[in-house]
Image (spheres, rainbow, N blue to C red):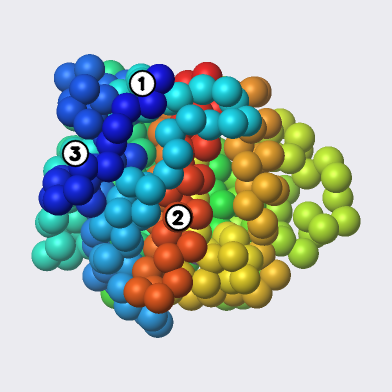
Amino acid sequence: MLTSRKIIGDKKMKTIYGGLENEFSDYSGAAIAVLPVPYDGTSTWIKGADKGPEALLEASANMELYDIETDSEVYTKGIATVEPVTEASSPEAMSAEVEKRVGKLLDDGKFPVLIGGEHSVSIGAFRAFAKRYEKFSVLQLDAHSDMRSEYEGSSHNHACVMARAKESATSIVQVGIRSSASEEYDNIIPERIFHAHELRYDDEWPDRVSSLLENDVYITIDLDVFDPSIMPSTGTPEPDGLYYREVLDLLTLINENHNIIGLDVVELCPNSINKAPDFLAAKLIYQFLSLRFR
Ligand SMILES: [Mn+2]
């Protein structure tokens, strides 16, 4: 049963994921919590990832809430949109706040979905999971390996996210990578990186990704993993990326074989004219949740 959710003039509609009414967005009853982190402190080229969460949430209010592929309405499980993380004095302070907020969501039994913001917003989430899970993997979908130990004076720069993931998680797997500095290959584990160009000639790669992951998996999706033809709204677009169906098929397989414990979708840098990428990001989350909570 679909509820009427487009209430003209309701200011809240813009900032609540799915434009859900109270019954389905109230925190206490929600299985899922969306945490916006509009942080853009360390991005190096196109700025604007701080506007990502609002654009994604606004787009999400225009989705159909029935998912055809799973024949389900995941919003009925309850999807709360919680107060955004506003701490931005430094990437370290932002990460500490994200860790605290994600930890609270986990302790309250919620499935956390972070929306960025630039990629450094994931670091706090990795740490919150590391405190609560003895073993878990981080699966990264990204154009960039983000494996620098330190960048521009900070270990919490977006370019260092996966170096931090390596410290928090039992293991990591990187998918869609097509841009790295040579020094990053000191940190990269060759059998755990799936470069975009290698996927084109290999039908078995999703199974190999799955075989490298622990049972519990946290997924971090930098939207620049997608080809810029469908996802131009990122801070550092890279050609030769993945397509929507490839990513959805991978998420479907990982969900079948593993227990996905959390998700983030980061680096949406919205363009006021082309809203399609905002909608892609919003719908990707919804289709993922439809799989996860089927
Ligand atoms: Mn990236």
Residue 11, label in figure: none
Q: Nearer the viewer, mark 2 or mark 3?
A: 2
Which amino acid type is marked by label 1? Thr
From the top left corner, tell me how far across and down residue 181 is, in percent: 57, 75
Q: Which residue is mark 2?
A: 279
Q: Which residue is mark 1?
A: 76
Q: Which is nearer the N-term, disc 3 or disc 1?
A: 1
Q: Picture quarter containing residue 76?
A: top left
126 and 189: which is toward the camera: 126
Which amino acid type is marked by label 2? Phe
Q: Is residue 197 left or right of residue 78?
A: right
Instruction: Name the residue rendered at 68%, 47% in the picture.
Output: 245
Q: Picture quarter containing residue 169?
A: top left
Instruction: Name the residue rendered at 59%, 61% in the picture.
Output: 226
From the top left corner, tell me how far across and down residue 218 is, in percent: 47, 36
Up-down relation of residue 266 to residue 228 (above or below): above
Badge 2: few (under 14), some or many (20 or more) residues near its Cα, within 10 Å? many
